[in-house]
Amino acid sequence: MSSEGFSIRPSQKKLEQPRRVRHGIRFRRKLGLEGLPWHAAAFVQAVEVGMPPDVRMLGMEYALAGQVANYTVTPGLVETAVQGRGVKPYVAKITVRPLSREEWDKVIERMAGEAVYAARLLTGEIPESIEECFAVVGRHLLPAPGDGLHTECDCGLEQPCKHVAAAGYLMGERIEVDPVVLFALRGLDGELLLERLQEQRTLQTSGISQAHATASTVEEDNGGLPPLEQCIADFWRPTAALEDAESAPTAEHVPHALLRRMGPSPMGGKFPMVGLLASIYDSIRARTAE
């Protein structure tokens, strides 16, 4: 073999490898795609439709090597930047059709009819029966025939390509640890979904006034009384007879008044602490009333 031929081979081999990405997003599941929960597996399978085995293998190699520079999830779109052999990363997209506001209203109303959905979602689980809730508007949470998933990439290769595969595998891994991202993909942020679900459950069980009531502030609740400094002389004297108190109208119940006064929890996490505590209080109240 000539020295000229020997000098060319390393450069050819180098060109076959993708450019490495510093601090790229890596696929970290030790079992690969094996053992994914049902919802993550369903998403990955939808991405792989029509994808040859060798493309899937290359896509997993890209995911394991951290070739995905970044990705974002917005209503209807997973958009990623995947570094290949080119100078610039390729833009790979996975799209689904979001639900409209009216469709979400009906889905949430259906979900609120059974406590299992709020309880399971608050623990980071998605029951398979949740698709029944989306069926009321003829839609799906996970990609399905007639309500499916589409992919595209600007790499110029036949679709779906290895860049799309890498994006799909990373999204599947994220769905496993953060399942409410599926709702964001369908058009409703996960925390907002839980808040609306809690409100709808209160509406169904307690009525409109309790579902939408807000705790009054001290200023709003003074009943038109004079300022405190004008009442010092009579502060310790009763102003009304005890029998008058018995005939006074009963104050309207405000659910979770203490939680409402405290406001959002400063603690981080995937799920709102206020919604979690409200669901626990409701469950205790329902069990006590049995």
Image (cartoon, rainbow, N blue to C red):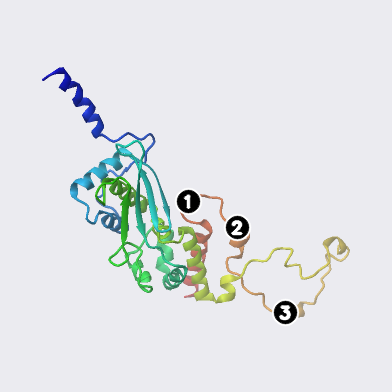
Spatial CA distance of label 1 from label 2 is 16 Å
Spatial CA distance of label 3 from label 1 is 44 Å
N-term-proximal mark, 3 vs 1: 3
Badge 1 local density, few (<14 within 10 Å), some, or many (20+)? few
The answer to whether residue 187 is above or below residue 213 is above
Tell me the amino acid under the disc marked 3.
Ala
Tell me the amino acid under the disc marked 2.
Gly
Please state if 119 lies on the left or on the right of 168 as rendered: right
Q: Which residue is mark 2?
A: 263
Q: Is residue 280 visible?
A: no
Residue depicted at 31% across the width and 54% down the height: 151
Residue depicted at 43% across the width and 65% down the height: 118
Residue reaching furthest left? 1
Residue depicted at 82% across the width and 72% down the height: 239
| Residue 209 picture location, percent across and down | 59, 75
Q: Which residue is mark 3?
A: 248
Between label 3 and label 1, give the one nearer the viewer: 1
Secondary structure category for the residue under label 2: loop
Please state if 15 lies on the left or on the right of 114 as rendered: left
Q: Which mark is residue 269?
A: 1
Secondary structure category for the residue under label 3: loop
Between label 2 and label 3, give the one nearer the viewer: 2
